[in-house]
Amino acid sequence: MACLCVGKCFNSVEWREMEMEMELQNLLSDLQSLTNLSLPDPSLHAPLRKIQSRVDHIANLAKAEPVRRSKVKDMSAEVVDSNPYSRLMALQRMGIVENYERIREFSVAIVGIGGVGSVAAEMLTRCGIGRLLLYDYDKVELANMNRLFFRPDQVGMTKTDAAVQTLSDINPDVVLESYTLNITTVDGFETYMSSLKNKSFCPNKQGSGVDLVLSCVDNYEARMAVNQACNELSQTWLESGVSEDAVSGHIQLLIPGETACFACAPPLVVASGVDERTLKREGVCAASLPTTMGVVAGLLVQNTLKFLLGFGQVSPYLGYNSLKDFFPTMQMKPNPQCSNVACLKRQEEYILAKPARDAAAKAEMEAEAPSTEEGPLHQDNEWNISVVDDCELDGPDTRSSDVLPEGLTHELPTADEFKNALTSEAPTNDNDDLEDLRRQLEAINSA
Amino acid sequence: MKSEPRLGVAWVRSREREMEGWDPNTKSTLTQIPLLTTKAGPRDGAAWTQRLKEEYKSLIAYTQMNKSNDNDWFRISAANAEGTRWTGKCWYVYNLLKYEFDLQFDIPVTYPSTAPELELPQLDGKTQKMYRGGKICLTVHFKPLWAKNCPRFGIAHALCLGLAPWLAAEVPILVDSGMIKHKDDATTSTESS
Ligand SMILES: [Zn+2]
């Protein structure tokens, strides 16, 4: 529903606050007119004055603005109660992270602001990320309240608007951009692509305008759209997901050309151990738990921080089976027969860049300097995935369903070869006219 | 749970199950819908135009087939010149009464790798078997079959495999539970707006 407010848009909380204020005003004026009357009993004056002062007090309390912290220019490591970043900067003092404050230079795009995406957004906001781009087309519903982040008073708002409201309150330093759109549609996809390409936040950055894309969507179609955009833009992304039965999940790192893209192989799912055929699906589409979603969001953002700030190792694939508390891992190299054209292009580029990578690796070894101080870490990703030896790339593709580690399985089959076609193909004739066909369908439709 | 070598076993099983779970009627109808050959989505320029022609031919054949089998159950046409948005109607007869619904969907940018998400906006919020926005919840059988047959399946196949079984399963439940009423049966019709 379109909002009918003129000018500023009020949410339900603001409406309630305004109503309360008006009621208090009315109460005060009622009291005033009561005291102005020459009351027959003078003993009533004192209690009336007392009521008046109480109402005044409540009115002042209601007028008081909620506490909002102001923006912080530089991240300080000073350990004082008033410093929102002291515990984060401590990571640097302890030697876990080399330069924490770099987090303010990074842009992260989060696609899907649901049970995982909203929590990931809050975590990154509290970590002081430079800029967040939020994408969703949905509205907040009461049915979402079994998950974290959104509040009942935000029901009816778009998820992107509600997220901006909460996140800007938590940390006004974060630059927030919200996009209320569906990335699987042609128009939505174009806007999505151009928002990723926009470099105004950090004009000197190499590549696209964002450092990492987080896919927090709940369906295959949207994941394929994220995959398409990231392959075209050569944009590294992290995929996340929670199973429809709410008891397992996963995260996956995708570096176009270097690791398998989402279309290289049928999507992996963590086998919950429950036989699919005994799973009762009648009457429901999907279940969800705040726990599983919180765990997956935590794993996702932990790996985001490691990727951006260059500490630890980023998992190429990490599964989560909550029934057994089992975390399968694996790695996948690109499929040279991938159906995605942009993926094949990225694979070609990756192979062509091998001599340069080798030289860089050699130089780094010779320098023997453990510090990797300068340069964007995500440019040269060798450090974070120990995955695929380059020599393996020359061999035939061994990635198939029978090399999956225990606990993982493919969700969908790959497309059959044409020889298995069910029936004859529709005769194709390039001379067919589209307009003519359209008219034919209309004629049958109205017959 | 005992760890079995899931690999090959799951694979073979999924192949066996490919058409398991579909009723014989759907199966035989499906095999008569002309298949498509061009793998192109709405961002693919001339190849998309070619694909669109194939979509039309397939839809024309399917609609004609339904009519001649006395099983006419939908109308669909492109709502824009690019053929990326489609709107129409679908209906289902239950207890001799016809229940009709608006039907709409967008062709996703990753089509035909991903199927269009069919929407019945009037039923949004009336059934659990639906995602928000009125997108119908497909059976576990649909997506594997679609993936396996990319790019040969088109809009007509999505309607036959996705929407037809959904209507057959959900309309009786919606009617019996009183969630929807027949338009002649109520002062305020729920299925027309
Ligand atoms: Zn690929």
Image (cartoon, rainbow, N blue to C red):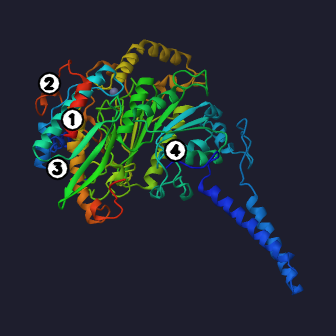
> Disc number at residue A443?
1
Q: CA distance from mark 3 to mark 2?
A: 30 Å
Q: Amino acid at mark 2?
A: Pro
Where residue A313 sits in the image (x, y, percent)?
48, 34
Considering depth in this image, is A383 or B85 the residue closer to the camera? Answer: B85
Residue displayed at 50% across by 27% down: A194
For residue A267, above or below residue A428:
below
Dot 2: few (<14), some (14–19), or many (≥20) neighbours within 10 Å?
few
Same subunit, labels 2 and 1: the answer reads yes
Q: Earlier in the sequence, mark 2 or mark 1?
A: 2
Nearest-to-viewer mark from 3 and 4: 3
Q: Earlier in the sequence, mark 2 or mark 4?
A: 4
Q: Amino acid at mark 4?
A: Ala
Considering depth in this image, is B123 or A397 the residue closer to the camera? Answer: B123
Q: CA distance from mark 4 to mark 1?
A: 51 Å
Asked where in the image residue A176 lies, by quadrant, the reply is top right
> Disc number at residue A427?
2
Residue displayed at 26% across by 61% down: B173
| SS at circle 4 | helix
Residue displayed at 64% across by 42% down: A88
> Disc number at residue A120?
4
Where residue A235 sits in the image (x, y, percent)?
46, 27
Same subunit, labels 4 and 1: the answer reads yes
Circle 3 is placed at which residue position? B21
| SS at circle 1 | helix
Q: Amino acid at mark 3?
A: Gly
